[in-house]
Structure formats: C-alpha cells, structure tokens
Image (cartoon, rainbow, N blue to C red):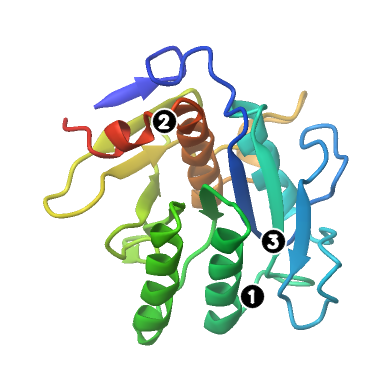
Amino acid sequence: MKLSLADAPFAEKTGRGVVIAVLDSGVHSGHPHVGDALIGRSFADSAPSADFADRIGHGTAVAAAIREKAPGAEILAVKIFDRQLATNVNVLADAIIWSADHGAKIINLSLGTANYANAERLADAVNHARARGAVVVSAREANDVSWLPGSLPGVVGVVADTACERNEVEITMREGDVPLFSASPYPRPIPGVPRERNLHGVSFAVANVTGFLARALEDGTAADLLNASS
C-alpha cells in the first residue's frame, strides 16, 4: 500500500505537539531547517550531558528531513555520536529509555547494528519505550543485512527505496509484525546540488517515515496506520 502526504491521515497535518527524539549526532539548534530543539541530552562518552551540539552534521540533516514533513513537531535532541558515527549498545539502550521517559512519542533511530549479541539489551529498551507509548522507528536492513533494533518485534522497521518519491511511503505487512515501511533515501534537497551528491541512505528513509508518523500521531490515527493491511 502506497501513501502520500496528500492522503489521510497525513493531509493538512503538521505533527503539531508530537515530541520526536532524534538519537544521533546531536542537533544544531536554531538551524533554519530545524528550528530550536525542545531540550537536549548527550549520552556520548566524549561529550558532557548538556552538550547536544552537532559536530558531524548527520543529526541535523536527519532532524531537518523530519521537520520538513512535520514542521509542527517538537525535536528532542539526544546525542549518542560525537566526533564519529559510532556508539555502543549501552549508550543506545540508555538513550532510548531516557527519551521515552522524557515525553518522546516517536524515537527516530537513523542507524542500526548487525551484532545480534545486542538483541536482548535493545529489546528491553524498546519494550520500555513501547510501554510508555513511544513508537520506535529504525533502519530494518541495508545491503541485504538485517539490523537491530529495526528488525525487532514492535519496532517500525524502514528500508530505503529509490522508487519512492519523497512525499510517499509504502507499507508492506509481515505476518506477526508491525508493517515494513519503504521510503525515499533522500533528505530535503539543497538548491543547485544534484540529489545524488547530497547525503542519502537509509538514515533519511527512517527520517521520512518518522515525519509521516508524526502527522498521523497529531490526531491519534497512527495506531490505525500501523495496523493497516495492504
């Protein structure tokens, strides 16, 4: 089933009042494509807890892709990367739990790991978040490799699909699981820069799906969307 921003339950919505935790390299608060972060917290070992400034750019680009589709949403900047896009399972799990405990209704994870030794720790964190009403959105697979936590039960798993336009998502039901979402791997365009030369990948497919879900959560229809059938 393919849906666009012009379709219900997304049309004329902005994600107003929906708190989205962006677990990434931080957010450049005040960036014109992002606006101000609601609050921030660093879990990165090399950064103080109050330092959620983005020094890599990835988290800001992810937040901008989300904000483009859900301009009314509130961004909770949760820094798990500092100088490089690398972290550990305990940092990630603690950040998921903290985000859910601090009001996030969507937890955006534009990331993944193929180390299944971490499955139990991440599943506990995801279950904690779900118990507090948060939806976890994460990369399910890339290059034919299944990732955690995106492939865990109860997580909205996302794959990148260049056949999807940036204003579309495609939903495929898998028995016994939440739907698999496919979305464009491209962030918001940069004027004068071909999209293939801009940042792109599953990170932005996740962000695009998060923006769609924020619109649906604005009026409480996300549960229907997550249970939709093709």
Task: Sort mark 1 into few (<14), some (14-19) or many (20+) by Cα contacts within 10 Å.
Answer: few
Closest to the observer: 91 or 220? 220
Callout 1–callout 2 Cβ contact below 8 Å: no
Query: Label 3: which residue?
Result: 78
Which residue is situated farthest in the bottom direction here? 117
Q: Residue at x 74, y 30 (%)?
A: 190
Residue 48: image x %, image y %?
A: 85, 76
Q: Secondary structure at mark 1?
A: loop
Q: Amino acid at mark 1?
A: Ala
Say left or right for 57 vs 163.
right
* Cα gap from disc 1 to disc 2, whole angstroms: 34 Å
Q: Nearer the viewer, mark 1 or mark 2?
A: 2
Q: Which residue is mark 1?
A: 86
Residue ID at (37%, 34%):
222
Q: Nearer the viewer, mark 3 or mark 1?
A: 3
Query: Image point 34% across, 41% down: which residue?
Result: 181
Q: Which residue is mark 2?
A: 220
| Quadrant showing the N terminus | top left
Q: First in sequence, mark 1 or 2: give its number.
A: 1
Element under disc 3: strand
Which callout, 3 or 2, points at the residue further toward the start of the chain? 3
Where is 214 relative to 88, above or below? above
Above-or-below relation of 221 to 132: above
Residue type indicated by callout 3: Val
Q: Secondary structure at mark 2?
A: loop
Kindly indicate the quadrant of the structure image that contains residue 91: bottom right
Amino acid type at circle 2 is Gly
